[in-house]
Amino acid sequence: MIYGELTQTLSLRLFPRKLLPWPRQQAEQWGGWFLLGLFALILLWEELWELENTAYLSACLLLLITAGAMIFSTLFERRFWCRYLCPIGGMNGMFGKLAMIELRAQQGICAASCTTYQCYKGGPQKGEGLETGGCPVYSHPAQLQDNRDCVLCMTCLKACPHRSVELNLRPPGIELWTTHTPAPAEVALLFLLLGAVFLHRLPEIVAHLGWAVDLENFVTHATLSTGILLIPGAIAFFCHQIIRILRSSNPKPFDFVVLSYGYLPLVLGANIAHYLRLGLTEMGQVVPVTFATLGISGFQAPAIAADPAVIAFLQGTTLLATALLSLLLTQKIARQPFGSLVPQHLAMMGFTVLLWQVIV
């Protein structure tokens, strides 16, 4: 986002004007669906054109996201792109709900002592509060209900003259069963990211199942890839419908969007497990690859790679731990006996077994 802020500053100096206010209502309604669609296109782009192994395509992706930040920073105040439209920001905000830290303000102090709202609006130095431009994503720390709309930039902490803003430790994901407001677009993103893990292993899945599928055919590859992204959400919804049928006499049936957040730890764990191999092997090749890129030879650069057994152990441990956390979180959200959620729990265990087969 530094490029967006730099563009905003330079454009205001060259062309003095008043930046547009945020269209909050439209952004709240459609922003999540926009970033979901963009994320889906990026995943398909990555799979169909082997983006992760093609340098210029990887550069185009980074430039695309940076261009989004720069364009919307030129048009709107602060970080409109980060809060509502950036696919990476949407993913980070969703996983941020599981964080064990939070930035919050004490509502009593804010209500009794604050009249300037410097943490939110910004302003000159006042008392212990430093001069700032205000929260870049327009979030008031006393009104935050979850971590999605906080980027931990600490601007509010620096600006507050009353020592109201605090960085707190908390039970991970506590907002999901207390103050959380569910969003359908966010749940769709959750299952999209679960499908993405299977999509990354599509050739292995096809080979393991013995399917006579020609992935060199673009239409076939695209159709299968789209299906892989949609299947996890469809399975979860099917299991939820079974729960509704079994509990048809209950006057307050479970809401699918609310209950789906129970999958969040498993989705995070699946993505971590998938990237552990890259992180513990290719990450250790950064120095020699950098030297080779710069044309430096005759120097034995250090290279580090973890043992495959160590990687497999960490992947398996991550999957098992996050699957257990998903079961516990689902119970906390639903506040119902374990037996009433068996179809959803079985789906989680099924996903864990499949992920174990394709990752570990």
Image (cartoon, rainbow, N blue to C red):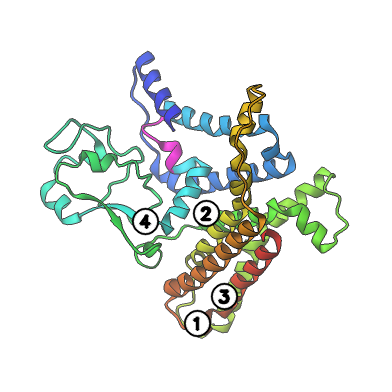
- Residue 92 or residue 258, whichever sits in front: 92
| Gap between marks 1 and 3 measured at Cα | 9 Å
| Image depth: mark 2 or mark 1 in front | 1
Task: Count the marks.
Answer: 4
Instruction: Give the residues drawn in magenta, as a range.
Output: 76-83
- Which label's residue is closer to the chain start, 4 or 2? 4
Which residue type does callout 1 highlight? Phe
Marks 2 & 3, CB-CB < 8 Å contact? no
Point out the frontmost of discs 2 and 3: 3
Q: Categorize mark 1 by other alpha carbons within 10 Å: few (<14), some (14-19), many (20+).
A: few
User: Marks 4 and 2: which is nearer the front?
Assistant: 4
CA–CA distance in space, label 2 to label 1: 27 Å
Q: In the shown orientation, is residue 337 left or right of residue 311?
A: left
Q: Position of residue 360 (x, y in %)?
A: 67, 61
Q: Which mark is residue 338?
A: 1
Q: On the image, numbered disc 2 is attached to which residue?
A: 185
Residue 84 rendering spot, x and y as whole percentages: 45, 43
Q: Residues within 10 Å of mark 2 (few under 14, many from 20)?
A: some
**Cβ atoms under marks 1 and 3 closer than 8 Å:** yes
Pointer 3: what residue? Answer: 345
The location of residue 5, given as percent across then percent down, is 40, 28
3D distance between C-alphas at marks 4 and 3: 25 Å
> Where is 81 relative to 338, above or below?
above
